[in-house]
Image (cartoon, grey):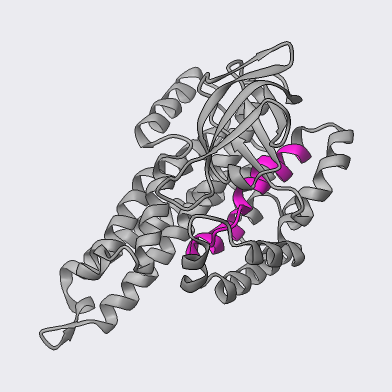
Amino acid sequence: MDFTPSEEQAAAQGLAARIFGDLSTHERMVAAGTGTDAGLWKELCTAGLPGAVEDIGLLGLVLLLEEQGHTTAQVPLAVTCVYGILAVAEHGTAEQRERLLPGLCDGTAVATGAFPARGGVKAVGGALYGVVPWVPWLRDATHVLVADAERDVWIVEAAAPGVTVVPVETTAPWSAGRLVLDGVRGESLGTGPGACAAILAASRTAFAGLQAGVCAGSLARAVQHTTTREQFGRPLSTNQGVLLRAADAHMDTEAIRVTAYEAAWRRDQQLDYEAQALTAAWWASEAGRRVVHAGQHLHGGTGADLDHPVHRHFLWGRQLDAYLGCGAELLEELGLLIGSGRTEGTS
């Protein structure tokens, strides 16, 4: 395995780092509230970053999402790429790819996903009925990827008759909403559990990459705080307890990153990666929660300030901890997968 970014992946990551670093400021995020930073999203699309995902693959997307997570930039990059561009490119028909991909790549269309499938949506003769309690970035979406109770996957236009979007506020400002489907006509993207499982594995890998960035950003803020804040005439970072807590957080962050890289690399190499995606998601849940708690605790009383930038990392980390399955659920699913023997032949 070689996770070294290709020239194209490295260039895309560098461009993303510059755009997020320049534009995703604390002041802009405060001004955006719980909504999307439309100006930042336009800048990313003008630079061609969402469209580049077709060429740089899931590993390239993970690298981009690390940069987003580092700044907790409020844009629907993850959902549009994983539930839109990658899903349609891999599972769509030639007609669907020709019709849907241009808008998703240039940012005029935004996709999101009502995942994972938990039996809340039923398909009756091509019409979808049911409620999904919350869907990330749903208030921005033009298209929603919906998995029904049989794990068939459907594309639904957010403005179609029979679709109701109710705004929902979550801990993270992800423009979320409750999706209500009442006889809406869906467009089939993939029948049977194969497409659903592949999309879910890709999304778990992508969001693990986003969590790696969130954790890295939280830790960077904690390091900056503890090396400049003094207690009894010495920087806080010279305290052994602080050093050990930061070191543990660093190792946890690296575990999230490397497992996300492995899963993404295997997907791009067309190898089975469902078990690796579950492993990355487990680390993102369990270790991610530890890291963002440590980041907040290492700020001392400052970490309790709801307006401090580190609190945003805490909220994102906790949201990502539970999205697409919390640690115990993922571990159970991984155990069932291993027990089924479907991971044989993978390393």
**Residue at x 67% of width, y 47% of height:** 80
**Residue at x 22% of width, y 65% of height:** 244
Q: Quadrant of residue 128?
A: top right
On screen, 52 above or below 24? above
Q: Position of residue 66 (x, y in %)?
A: 53, 60
Q: Is residue 211 magenta?
A: no
Q: Position of residue 201 (x, y in %)?
A: 58, 36
Q: Is residue 273 visible?
A: no
Furthest toward the bottom, the residue is 233
Q: Is the C terminus in the top left, top right, bottom left or bottom right quadrant? A: top right
For residue 205, side relative to residue 303 (left or right) = right
For residue 171, side relative to residue 189 (left or right) = left
Magenta residues, dominant SS class? helix
Looking at the image, which is closer to me, 342 or 294? Answer: 294
On screen, 134 above or below 79? above
Task: Count the marks.
Answer: 0
**Residue at x 80% of width, y 49% of height:** 103
Magenta span: 62-89
Q: Position of residue 40 (x, y in %)?
A: 63, 66
Q: Position of residue 11 (x, y in %)?
A: 70, 69
Looking at the image, which is closer to me, 257 or 46? Answer: 46
Furthest toward the left, the residue is 232
